[in-house]
Amino acid sequence: MSKIIDRNLVVGLDIGTSKISVAVGEITPDRKLSIVGVGSQPARGMDKGGVNDLNLVIQSIQRAINEAELMADCHITSVYLGISGKHISCQNENGMVPINDKEVVQEDVDNVIHTARSVPISAERRMLHVLPQEFSIDVQDGIKSPIGMSGVRMEAKVHIVTCANDMAKNIVKCVERCDLKADQLIFSALASSYAVLTDDEKELGICVVDIGAGTIDIAVFTGGALRHTAVIPVAGNQVTSDISKIFRTPLSHAEEIKVQYACALRQMVSMEENIEVPSVGGRPARSMSRHTLAEVVEPRYHELFELIQETVREAGLEDQIAAGYVLTGGTSKMEGVVEFAEEVFQMPVRVATPKDVTGLQEYVNDPTYSTVVGLLHYGMQANEQQNSELKPNDSVRSIGSRIVAWFKGEF
């Protein structure tokens, strides 16, 4: 069994409410990401992105890790870890510094970002990301990379993502109990954006919405930078719960019915189609109309879409996302979701699967793997940055990698 370091591997771990996914990616010599191993297990002991039962979560992680190790033929020692939950919050901050020399050098950029991130945050919160949006020098605004430019003072706008320290500690503890090291915690929607968005979409203005089982993770990009992040603590499990109550069937059967037969838009389902619905307590199964199922599902999806729209509207970004919405995550896979979302949002909508990967891509060609593949892309860029910083002679690459580091919020 080969060690990770020998083969230039990177590992992502996404601990979701309903599923734990592990992906092992090999960074090829031409700087592409090749999927060499995947592990997936039902999540137990998780609720809305938070840990409910430590031991159950540890068991589920261990199984998923073993599966990925077997497929990739390697021994996993560290992972890039996704985090979500309603405790995630964000703020946009500014920082300003005088420019010491006649032109901006790396030290000035580090200083201005440090000034912007030096906002007081409470002891129970932890900074996840500090992501520069743009710089301005004297009267010139909207500068993406200020190094080498002349001026007297420089200002930076940054987007700060924070999480509850205790929640982060619990999820890291689960990983460490599996003898793994968490290289970095990454907000799930930010990770997903690495796997599903194009640069054009980020520039034009886009809202990526990762709809899982317990949470909806949102990240809004305009002008190539992250402007807003949010987590809504309702998602696909609400749909399953509705089906379970109205059809009086156990949750496990309700989930199967949802995945196989549900449609988010009732007008897309014919009245004649029937489905078998298992009963509880040994009673015989009943036959139900699929149209009735759509009538149960549609109002809940309408509510979810309205919550998403309200979040973007409250952030004041609704008019700035010209490229519309990108939906991903397991709950976005249902038939009729795109049509219904376009009707509610009055904007273009697409459901996205991970892109820019080779190797075992058929294993991850599904919206449920967007976060874990995004963690690999994130980890790959972090590795490139570390490698280039180990070669101080190569100053051009070193500066380039530092620029990558600011835009990923690694400080």
Image (tube, rainbow, N blue to C red):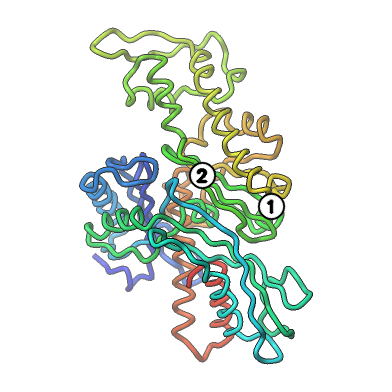
Q: Quadrant of residue 122?
A: bottom left
Q: Quadrant of residue 165?
A: bottom left
x then y, percent, for residue 153? 70, 81
> Does label 2 or label 1 sit earlier along the sequence?
1
Q: Residue at x 29, y 49 (%)?
A: 64
Q: Residue at x 56, y 65 (%)?
A: 131
CB under 8 Å between discs 2 and 1: no
x then y, percent, for residue 386? 44, 77
Residue kind at label 1, given as amino acid type: Gly
Q: Residue at x 35, y 42 (%)?
A: 19
Q: In this orientation, which residue lies closer to the viewer: 98 or 250?
A: 98
x then y, percent, for residue 51? 31, 46
SS type, badge 1: loop
x then y, percent, for residue 339? 64, 30
Q: Is residue 411 above or below residue 186?
A: below
Task: State the residue position of label 2.
Answer: 210
In the shown orientation, is residue 12 left or right of residue 307?
left
Q: In this orientation, which residue lies closer to the viewer: 80 or 166?
A: 166
| Circle on res. 10 | none
Task: State the residue position of label 1.
Answer: 205
In the shown orientation, is residue 313 left or right of residue 117?
right
Q: Is residue 337 above or below residue 409?
A: above
